[in-house]
Image (cartoon, rainbow, N blue to C red):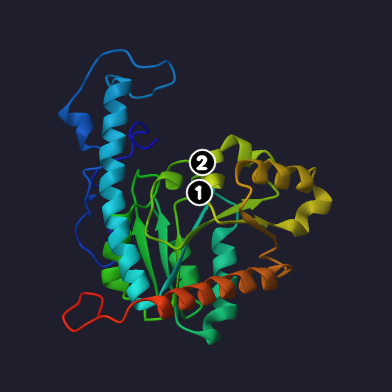
Amino acid sequence: MCTVCGCGEGEVTMEGEAHSHHPHHGHHSPHALARDFTPGPIWAHAPGLSQKRMVQIEQDILSKNDRYAQENRRYFQTHGILALNLVSSPGAGKTTLLVRTVEELKTQGPLAVIEGDQQTSNDVERIRATGAPALQINTGKGCHLDAHMVGHALERLRPLKDSLLFIENVGNLVCPAAFDLGEAHKVVVLSVTEGEDKPLKYPDMFHAARLMILNKIDLLPYLEFDVARCLEYAHRINPQMDVIQLSAQTGEGLADWYAWIGRQRQALIGQQSRRPVAAAGDPLAV
């Protein structure tokens, strides 16, 4: 977990801001505030912090994050924005999938992208080449985006009403699972160049995801990857999770991905129609 993984505080930078963006929740400041040299469990990698203290820190961090996530979710709902949080290990093909998706859906309505990366702006430049608005968040040593970072990004990016917003998280199948960004759904991208047992190795992420995309299926003839076993593992962790097999490179299966997005948009529209009409002065009357 991030409470013990050594993420750096104050190293977050957001495009267009001259100063470092300090995490809202003092993400790791408790490390400095209260050192307890009681030996922790053997697997803990935070010397000086007891298990009890780590649990307390983690609860504090996640509760603050959840409050920011609720603000983001409220923003998305009142503006009719479908926000999808794409997560994966590094190299699974998230950016290639996003570039192609943006290229092929941009004529159907407004969309925007928030890119998370530790250091570079390479991915956001690829997205902008499609003509879509995009904003880069560099997390420094941080291993995930949090809801406060996304809230600040929304203030700068200002996605249009009734738009589609993709959030590409930092490549990591562990910590992003715990951080709600206010998104409608997490979408976990797994490539066939990885082990088919990833769902068992990183169950929290697959449990949190609404959809698993199995990417790079064009490479299956050249690999020893058991698709059936992978899907069985995934549904063992999350029986309700949708699965789409595709190749962002060749385009095979992308129609299923776009149809899935379309169904989520229709669901959002349905929720909007069932919302009570906001009265004058009501904060919902945005």
Distance from label 2 to label 1 (Cα)?
A: 6 Å
| Looking at the image, residue 60 lies above or below residue 250 | above
Q: Which residue is found at the position 44% from the left and 20% from the top?
A: 43
Under tag 1, what secondary structure?
A: helix
Whole-percent x, y for residue 115 in the image: 42, 62
In the image, taking residue 36 as reference, residue 144 lies left or right, namely: right
What residue does disc 1 label? 208
Under tag 2, what secondary structure?
A: helix
> Do the residues under discs 2 and 1 have CB atoms within 8 angstroms?
yes
Whole-percent x, y for residue 71 in the image: 28, 62
| Looking at the image, residue 222 lies above or below residue 279 | above
Q: What is the tally of numbered marks visible in this picture? A: 2
Q: Residue 160 falls in which quadrant of the image?
A: bottom left
Whole-percent x, y for residue 146 in the image: 34, 52
Mark 2 surroundings within 10 Å by alpha-carbon count, few (fewer than 14), some (14 through 19), many (20 or more): some
Amino acid tagged 2? Asp
Task: Report the quarter where the N terminus lies.
Answer: top left
Q: Which residue is found at the position 33% from the left and 24% from the top?
A: 46
Q: Residue 282 falls in which quadrant of the image?
A: bottom left
Amino acid tagged 1? Ala
Whole-percent x, y for residue 106 in the image: 52, 82
Judge whether residue 194 can be spotted in this image.
Answer: no
In-front residue for pair 3/6: 3
In the image, taking residue 166 as reference, residue 28 lies left or right, namely: left
Judge whether residue 253 can be spotted in this image.
Answer: yes
Q: Residue 3 falls in which quadrant of the image?
A: top left
In the image, taking residue 284 as reference, residue 258 lies left or right, namely: right
| Looking at the image, residue 81 lies above or below residue 225 | below
Mark 1 surroundings within 10 Å by alpha-carbon count, few (fewer than 14), some (14 through 19), many (20 or more): some
Name the mark on residue 44: none
What residue does disc 2 label? 204
Q: Which residue is found at the position 56% from the left and 46% from the top?
A: 206
